[in-house]
Amino acid sequence: MRETLEYNIPLALASNSEKARSEMIIAPLLIELRKQLNSQISLFSGIEFNVDEEQGLKGICDFLISRSPELLMMTAPVILIVEAKKENLNAGLGQCVAEMVAARLFNEREENQIKTIYGAVTTGSIWKFIRLQNDTVEIDLGEYFIDNVNKILGILSRGVMA
């Protein structure tokens, strides 16, 4: 993983595009997470997640992690990841929280026993984490940098396994 990121990060940052960061940093990191968790989770990228149009809970998710190995259909969303637009982490927090609320509603409708939904907003090189439990949103004020990839993977792993 380190070797892949050491090669990919300069390419992604030099191109300065969200697509490059998504493909060269975020996706490889999430694939590594799936490997570390013995393929017990599924990853979705760019999927429609229309849960409740009347509440505005509809749209395309950048990345979604499901607590299920099912690859063809999303069944148990637990972590939502939003790519920060124009590298502004704080601007992505609202979108991420909305997606987390949609995931909670989805899980309730499917009778999934998932009590906490996690979220992350990222530029690829910087990560910020959020937790939704009941009606309380907690935002980790820290920012985690990609050079500490093991810490980022650890936080994501705890979110999936919680």
Image (cartoon, grey):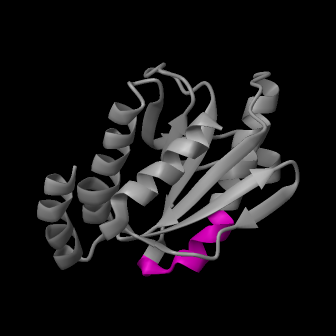
Q: What stretch is highlighted in magenta?
A: 86-95
Q: Determine the image quadrant of residue 145.
A: bottom left
Question: 149 or 127: nearer the eye?
Answer: 149
Q: Is residue 95 visible?
A: yes
Q: In which quarter of the image is the C terminus?
A: top right
Residue depicted at 16% across the width and 53% down the height: 4
Residue 2 higher or lower than 146, as above or below:
above
In the image, taking residue 56 as reference, residue 83 lies left or right, namely left
Residue 51 image point, x, y percent:
71, 39
Q: Which of 62 and 58 is in front in this view?
A: 62
**Residue at left offset 17%, top offset 78%:** 14
On screen, residue 9 versus residue 126, left or right, reads left
Is 89 contained in the magenta span?
Answer: yes
Dominant secondary structure of the magenta stretch? helix
Q: Which residue lies furthest to the right in this view?
A: 135
- Residue 68 in percent (x, y) is at 54, 23
Relative to 32, say whether 109 is above or below: above
Residue 80, percent across and down?
A: 57, 49
Name which residue lies at 36% across and 65% down. Answer: 148
> Along the line of sight, which residue is nearer the eye, 66 or 17?
66
Residue 61 showing in the rendered view: no
Q: In this view, does 115 lie above or below 13?
A: above
As drawn, is 70 to the left or to the right of 97? left
